[in-house]
Amino acid sequence: MLNRRRFVGLTAAAIAVPSVRPSRAAGAEWPAKPVRVVVPFTPGGSTDTTARLVGNRLQEVWGQSVVIENKPGAGGNIAADMVAHSDPDGYTIFIVGPGLATNQFLYPQLSYDPVGDFAPVTLLITQPNMMCVPNSSPAKSVQEFIAYCNANRGKVTYASSGNGTTLHLSGELFKRLANVEMTHIPYRGGAPAINDLIPGRVDVIFDNVPTVVQHVREGQLRGLAVTTKERIAIMPEMPTIAESGVPGFDVSSWFGFFVPARTPPDIIAKINADTNAALVHPSVKPRFEHLGAVPKGSTPAELAAFLKSEIDKWGPVIADARIKVEN
């Protein structure tokens, strides 16, 4: 559970981080060697895509290699544990999303503190998910998919990139609000899940738009609806799940940069400033927008507050649904 005093301390520390680059301090000489960005899922998924788009630009700015290191498993906990126990020198950056807020409610025990062991740097992007089915599916709309579920009770499966991810929680929320039965099939990342969805080995996925939009555009998958309460600019013709007969459905994904706690504030400030600049660079921003993602950027304090809001949002949902994941 969230330790309120620890969270207040984290927020205060985030506010104390300077918003401009220091002239002479540890950050002035940083980075002096390659920087690694730890991705908690397999290559090819939305988290990995985001890390590589931002990392490529940071590599140009820093003049040092930015190495993307994929550490999948346990809904992101393996990567989180590694980063939490890494040296707090700025050379290990964690790109993470809702799992940092939800895993404390999903798992009986964590080997790290999702609040106290990390220092927030900046919010990167937000993005909707898309409900997709194989082209072989008889469902061409959300209502047709609900009818398919009701006609095949106990047989319908939905894929996710891992237990406790937004893909998983989206599926559980859909089950509850649409009153259907589906069996969760977790994968070690979004890419292998899609590989099984395309030939119809699973029936549906609620995946990040950047991961699936090209498959939908190329006709490899059929997009039924987006998970946010509003339609998205890159596919305005696609309805939302809420307007398709499942009122109240509203889910989006996000990614942010965090570093190990006790990383020097001036280094955090430098990573923050350079990353926020990268998000609006002409080589980065249009590519995110083409994928349906919204580049954000933030201060460390704003990311701390956003994380708190996610914890407050998902904790009761997970508890009410009695969702538990074994370590």
Image (cartoon, rainbow, N blue to C red):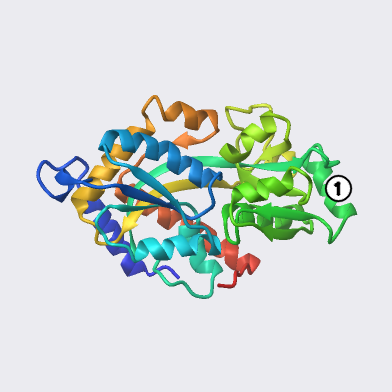
Amino acid, disc 1: Ala
Would you say 123 lies left or right of 28 here? right
Q: Which residue is drawn at 64% across and 54% down?
A: 160
Q: Where is residue 152 in the image (x, y as percent from the top left)?
A: 88, 55
Question: In the image, is 5 to the left or to the right of 166?
Answer: left
Image position, residue 183 (x, y; %): 75, 60
Q: Which residue lies furthest to the right in this view?
A: 151
Q: Nearer the viewer, residue 270 or 306?
A: 270
Viewer can see residue 228: no
Q: Name the residue under label 1.
A: 147
- Residue at far top of view: 282
Total labels: the figure holds 1
Q: In this view, does 279 lie to the left or right of 219?
A: left
Report the residue at 20% width, 46% height from top.
30
Residue 163 visible in the snapshot = yes
Q: Please state the horizontal and vertical placement of residue 99, each as a whole percent of the image.
A: 50, 58
Quick one: label 1, few (<14), some, or many (20+) residues within 10 Å? few
Q: Residue at x 61, y 70 (%)?
A: 324
Does 227 appear above or below 214? below
Q: Position of residue 126 (x, y in %)?
A: 49, 41
Quadrant of the drawing holding the N terminus: bottom left
Quadrant of res 199:
top right
Q: Helix, strand or loop at disc 1?
A: helix
Q: In which quarter of the image is the C terminus?
A: bottom right
